[in-house]
Amino acid sequence: MAGGGSLRFQREIPIRHDVEVFVAGGGPAGVAAAVAAAREGRSVFLAEGQSCLGGMGTAGLVP
């Protein structure tokens, strides 16, 4: 850091999942990335904010 200071966090956030690959978003690209990593033997966590995977390709079909 500039000025030689150290980085300090305001609070500790607990780690709930210890994984090798974290994928944010369950759209087509996120699902493909998670599957590819899992097939390579990696531990994967896929986080999706909606109630279904597939992104707008899926959610856009629901009225």
Image (tube, grey):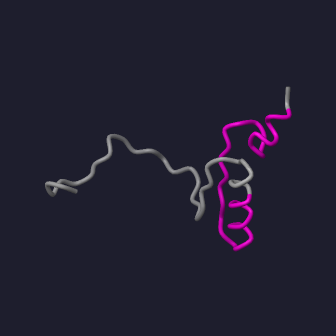
**Where's residue 4, x and y in %?**
15, 57
Which one is in front, 20 or 29? 29
**Where's residue 29, x and y in %?**
70, 55
Which residues are drawn in magenta? 32-61
**Where's residue 22, x and y in %?**
60, 56
The quadrant the C terminus occupies is top right
The quadrant the N terminus occupies is bottom left
Which one is in front, 37 or 20? 37
- The reply to whether the magenta stretch includes residue 8 is no
Q: How many labels does the image show?
A: 0
The residue most toward the bottom is 40
Q: Which residue is drawn at 68% across and 61% down?
A: 33
Q: Which residue is drawn at 61% across and 49% down?
A: 24
Q: Quadrant of residue 41?
A: bottom right
**Does residue 40 lie above or below 63 as drawn?**
below
| Left or right of residue 17, residue 32 in this image | right
Q: Residue at x 18, y 55 (%)?
A: 2
